[in-house]
Amino acid sequence: VSGLSLSLFGAVFAHGELARGLDDAALLQALLDVEAGLARALARAGLVPPSAAEAVTRAARAASFSSAELAAAAVAAGNPVPALVKALRAALPPSAAEAVHTGATSQDIVDSALMVLAARALPALTNDLAAAAAACARLAEVHRGTIMLGRTLLQPATPITFGLKAAGWLHALDTARVALRELGRTQLLLQFGGAAGTLAVLGARGVEVARFLAEELELREPIMPWHTQRGPIAAWAGGLGGCAAAIGKIARDITLLAQAEVGELREAGGEGRGGSSTMPHKQNPIASIAAVSCTRRAPQLVATLLACAEQEHERAAGAWHAEWEPLLSLWALAGSAAAWLRESLAGLQVDTARMRHNFDALRGLPMAERVAGELAHKLGKAAAQALVRDASLAAAADGGGLQRALAAHADELARAGVSSEELAGWLDPSGYLGSADTFIDRALAAHAQAGHNS
Amino acid sequence: VSGLSLSLFGAVFAHGELARGLDDAALLQALLDVEAGLARALARAGLVPPSAAEAVTRAARAASFSSAELAAAAVAAGNPVPALVKALRAALPPSAAEAVHTGATSQDIVDSALMVLAARALPALTNDLAAAAAACARLAEVHRGTIMLGRTLLQPATPITFGLKAAGWLHALDTARVALRELGRTQLLLQFGGAAGTLAVLGARGVEVARFLAEELELREPIMPWHTQRGPIAAWAGGLGGCAAAIGKIARDITLLAQAEVGELREAGGEGRGGSSTMPHKQNPIASIAAVSCTRRAPQLVATLLACAEQEHERAAGAWHAEWEPLLSLWALAGSAAAWLRESLAGLQVDTARMRHNFDALRGLPMAERVAGELAHKLGKAAAQALVRDASLAAAADGGGLQRALAAHADELARAGVSSEELAGWLDPSGYLGSADTFIDRALAAHAQAGHNS
Amino acid sequence: VSGLSLSLFGAVFAHGELARGLDDAALLQALLDVEAGLARALARAGLVPPSAAEAVTRAARAASFSSAELAAAAVAAGNPVPALVKALRAALPPSAAEAVHTGATSQDIVDSALMVLAARALPALTNDLAAAAAACARLAEVHRGTIMLGRTLLQPATPITFGLKAAGWLHALDTARVALRELGRTQLLLQFGGAAGTLAVLGARGVEVARFLAEELELREPIMPWHTQRGPIAAWAGGLGGCAAAIGKIARDITLLAQAEVGELREAGGEGRGGSSTMPHKQNPIASIAAVSCTRRAPQLVATLLACAEQEHERAAGAWHAEWEPLLSLWALAGSAAAWLRESLAGLQVDTARMRHNFDALRGLPMAERVAGELAHKLGKAAAQALVRDASLAAAADGGGLQRALAAHADELARAGVSSEELAGWLDPSGYLGSADTFIDRALAAHAQAGHNS
Amino acid sequence: VSGLSLSLFGAVFAHGELARGLDDAALLQALLDVEAGLARALARAGLVPPSAAEAVTRAARAASFSSAELAAAAVAAGNPVPALVKALRAALPPSAAEAVHTGATSQDIVDSALMVLAARALPALTNDLAAAAAACARLAEVHRGTIMLGRTLLQPATPITFGLKAAGWLHALDTARVALRELGRTQLLLQFGGAAGTLAVLGARGVEVARFLAEELELREPIMPWHTQRGPIAAWAGGLGGCAAAIGKIARDITLLAQAEVGELREAGGEGRGGSSTMPHKQNPIASIAAVSCTRRAPQLVATLLACAEQEHERAAGAWHAEWEPLLSLWALAGSAAAWLRESLAGLQVDTARMRHNFDALRGLPMAERVAGELAHKLGKAAAQALVRDASLAAAADGGGLQRALAAHADELARAGVSSEELAGWLDPSGYLGSADTFIDRALAAHAQAGHNS
């Protein structure tokens, strides 16, 4: 069965339940499910016999059809539906064959099938996001007091805790998950409008059949057909793009913290995980790297979908077709990324000693802001900033540490009434964490509210 | 005052209230407003004297500062805030100068200022969208019965009404507007975390000051700082991208319907509007063309913002800076597009006779689906489709119309009991509009519910 | 065998020789070819026995390996090479197994395999481009005198010939083809650097083996390994993106000229080509529509590849992997688009009468520029422009044509010495084609120089 | 004067000679230069009096016109040319006014002006690239023997030299520069086609005037007008995008090597360079960070330009306008990035001791590949890989280093005849640099060939 990735690259890009499931068979089944749902909806409206609907439903099994043959036949129309309708009808007795596809146009079937696929993919994605979030929540709780270096512009900033960093990851994942769930409630929309969006074939019964069809497919009935009003596609693009963005940030942090020179995080290894074709010592954090590989491809797929939203008249001449694979790829890549991140977080090894070591190796420099802030009460802000900047530059230049560099300003400090005990206290990061704990609490509370599963 | 577009191109890309307002002065004022709001928040928390907060607020006027000088000074830090803080402090007495920027980091000021700008830009955007939607609603109502050709893949499909087309435009605009309003309620977020997101400078008072600051700026207080969790930026990117997508589709339809060979719509002209530098006869529908010019640039700006969401640690080394202009450009382009579309729709001239003429010129071909559907009751679906396809191809080939082509099948039709009166009735488009009216009603009802202003 | 598109959508997106060939089997074979080429290169350098190289070459057949098993094994390393090397060694006697992959790193194999695939894909692409160009050249020659309306901003401009339009298409296709051929000469580059780009495993023999390997694979030897210097990938991205851009413009023109209301071009039909699932009369120009579907996806794939060029140190942590599928997809989409365009152009039916009819239907308005230009000699430019603008607006408003509208200015024209014969002459488009013929000649000459095959 | 960036952000994004120069005044002057060039070309063809051409040339000074007024007047036409032509004519005596804009259409002026701007911007860009490359060449030469850790997937790989890394940077910059220079030779194209690309206004004299105009503007004369064949724009997009890609990689490497925990590179500081609004100790490598900020925005601008290449008929209804600012922004961002990188490299401080320290801190692990390779001669490849993998994992786990971990396999090594002296020798990185020196030599030779200036 053929999927959205070449098999050999699928190890990275078709990872996890969602992405592995998005293949030809799944698409074919979804297309058939829409045709079958339509037959049942027509039967509920009394427009075709119930027996015909049952026959269509029975026949609508992907395994009964050949993707390859359908694909060959799809060239003429430029989309697979006419060939599929023909094949489905051929597999049915005449009375049931008549019932197939009544009132629909190809786009109704494809768009609705993509929504059915989305509905099926969503739980796997939110489950992986929820599991990743749960891992972050544990890290936030456990490492609430674990001092580490805050880093801005890839340079030392002020102290944070690893719990705070994990809380930031947590809240981003929860926000993305909640947004996707909301899309699941509002944007899993039926498409059903017939040739030009009027449902003319069904006369006055169109909206009734549409309501039944939405029920059959467990999709939401839209205000009107959206053949060339691609708001729902744009909404999913945005949601999946936001999800990938949240994942990519976390995965990037992990790869950076796993650098040998930083050494604060490590992914679980095992069975050649993270190995190389030539270097025996390699233990690459391959789960977070693979997650980044997936998320890097997402933004431009979002752009493709948005660019394709400029659709002409009642059906676009090219832009609609161009959506199909980018939309499914976006699902697959978001799903793969979530599965990789979940794995990475599940086995993450935290080296708290190394976190502290890296902080202490800077010999007080990350506390410069605090020292300046405390001194400002005595010297004024400008003078305090100037003094501490001087000392910081000196400390950075000679590697002797901030405390020693401040000693060069001992007279000024003494005049300001700063004792060396007081100064030493200012250099303790555990007293300079501000609202970190509150932020962790809030993120955990929001997580509890978001719920643990999808 | 310098804006986001070169002036000479700004006629297109800085059109309307929103876009014209997004310039250096507005940004500078927003940055100052955040600093002033912070001073007042600190005063409310008792951390600085009220008089200092008042002094800062009085001093925080864009007109008092030189963008050019600030820009020159901004090179060293890579962002304008340190230079601005220095200039603002220099404009204050020492006691008030001390109050400036306490607890904040540059990113707090810039991110919050961009949110303040967003809050200020949003009403102009939703107003233009609402006005454009109102114009569509009028068209949907007035042209509820105006027959026109439905076009799929840029080829004749089945009949629709212009009212239905306008209803589709209407609902897309309303959906985009409602989504933006929802973002206005949830995603106009304060940024306030200090150097590394702990608000350490403020000790235990950080979250209290954050709450006051959010109130002062009329922004929402987030769960925690989002310095490198760019969900809010991604959400705005998605909302603005979706808005541009909705506009682009409508503007494209107008340019297509305004083609001389189609001639169904025309933009209001006047004062050289749509003129050329060399062709005296030109009356280009310049408003819809300009709208397309704007919307074509939006998808990739969304992609840039999503790609930049992979931000390292506690502040990104490059990706944060890279967001600034694309975000503001996206606002400006969405705003310009909305303003252009509003103008285009406001003066749109509908040639209903031409609509009917274009439909009739196809001599029955757009009714082929209906004829096949009616015949299916008598001949079965497959036979009916085959007969009508034959007739349609013949009609298309000789230009003689469907009715005449069907006459070649007179015997078969007679055997099936189809009278020529019946056949003629099937060729009347007004009887083949299905649920068009219902969809119009629904879109109008949703519009009423969405409200007429933002 | 699994490809880059879902089979059911592959009818559109895996069209033509190039795209159909880019599947798992082709990738696997290319990877194996690189390993086999390396064994032979090592043998030429005397580093492994010739018999080992022969054995590796014999064993390196895609059919002997299971993509699915390799894919499963690829998860651990994040790329397929370690698993492939293991499987290849397992298929060889120990002495030959030792020879496999010596000196190489996974990226050497994947990057070189992608270049081998590119080398194999290029002729199919340039052949299709050459065939499409040849069709355009015929159109340019045959329709050198076929008057049609020039259209700017989708509105009537001045007369052109269809030959000129075809010449523009022709030259764009030739330019893209020549650029791709040039890339074929300069940017089909070997990748061979070993673990960190030093070829350390091969001691002093690295560059010698690299030269032999380049010869074996018929790739160009680079100045140095380009593991994280992605200039060659960016160059191919640019070339393929430019090719897609050239195709997209032509396909869009065809879809616009095939609109029923324009009716100047028609694609060849046949066997349900361009049919619909519900409308029997449909004859969509599906080849040009499918071409647009392909080209719309190309720009963002180029962006992904460019964005991924920011690769860390000696091998990227994510960005390299993220290139694989977008690069191959870009090849496949450019190839599909070229194949579709070739088909569209090969069967294009030109309705020259309709071209003239559409021109004449504007009743002289497209000649307004000429009339103004001629009058300028008598009245001055400003007065002439004003007079003709007045007349044009009147003509457009009442539909009576430019000549009649100019009659309202008969006195002024008479004073200027303009006879009605002279005026009538100015309204003849055949006398107002400027350098059209010269441009056609030049484009044909450049085409002859570019050669007819790749 | 207004530019492409808000002034306050221009410190980052309008850095260096090229970007600072791309403002309203420059655009206005370029537009005027094209009009003046056209007047002179017409005069050379004898179509207007020389005195008129001289008067136009004298009048065509940006300082004589108000961008703001022109911008206001540009709204009607949707591009600035009609307003500019009117203003220019108004500034001239009637006889000269007649000569202005003869034969041209707005797009001729704008496209040619953008090419004139490109021609003016190119030397600044290639100069900065050449200076950055020269800095890299010095680093490559000086640090040809400086051992440092090669890093793949952000993890330790095998030894390289800093000279090799610098050679990689060098060659990427030279390749980008050579490609841009080649574009300068082939793709600085005149646009001149008149209303619909026939130059009809000029009768038989069109191509002659075009040749003269190309000479006047020092642009290349194209085969034919390229109003809607955007190959030249796509070519520049590709070249500038490739340039940004090359810069971004280098800047990213610098920011990573400047991390406190790595500490191998440092940017020159001075005058608050890299400072923070709140942290006195900050010394951010702001030049490389700013370069990344610029390069991150480039790929999507390339995509916008490629997407806009689908232009309808003889002038696009929206897509042409949409190119203007993205193209200029791409120039400005590439130029800013190059200027920032040049600064970063010019002052780069290399800590060779830290490079060695970081390598040694891994206690032999980066030599695992070599040890395995040498042992393979004695134990066979598989056994050697297994042994060294065991030892490497043990060494990584206990931090005791590879040599000690190998001691656990002393018996096996002894049986294989490996002495401890031999083993110690294998752990010396200076003996495991393969072809690094050759690659440096080649990159330096290619640099010499590329020339030191543009």
Image (tube, coloured by chain):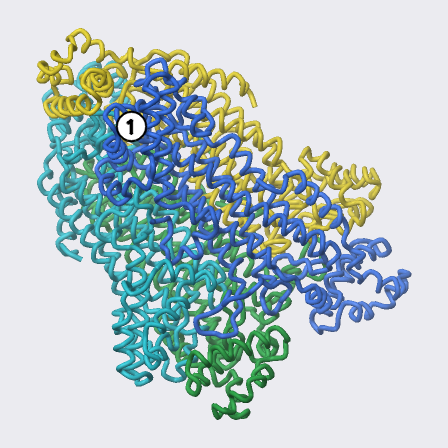
Chain colours: A green, B cyan, C yellow, D blue
The residue lying toward the viewer, choosing from D190 and C325, is D190
Residue A367, position in %: x, y? 51, 80
Q: Quadrant of residue B8?
A: top left
For label 1, the residue is C152
**What is the tally of numbered marks visible in this picture?**
1
Tell me the element at label 1: strand
The amino acid pointed to by label 1 is Thr
The residue lying toward the viewer, choosing from D436 and D378, is D436
Picture layout, residue A54 above or below residue B426: below
- Residue at image x 49%, y 26%? C175
Q: Is residue C90 left or right of residue B193?
A: right
Residue B323, position in %: x, y? 40, 57
Q: Is residue B51 left or right of residue A440?
A: left
Residue D42, position in %: x, y? 35, 21
Picture layout, residue A237 above or below residue A313: below
Picture layout, residue A63 above or below residue C157: below
The residue lying toward the viewer, choosing from C56 and C103, is C103
- Residue at image x 53%, y 85%? A428
Q: Is residue A447 left or right of residue A38?
A: right
- Residue at image x 73%, y 47%? C101
Q: Is residue C86 visible?
A: no
The residue lying toward the viewer, choosing from B173 and A379, is A379
Q: Quadrant of residue D80?
A: top left
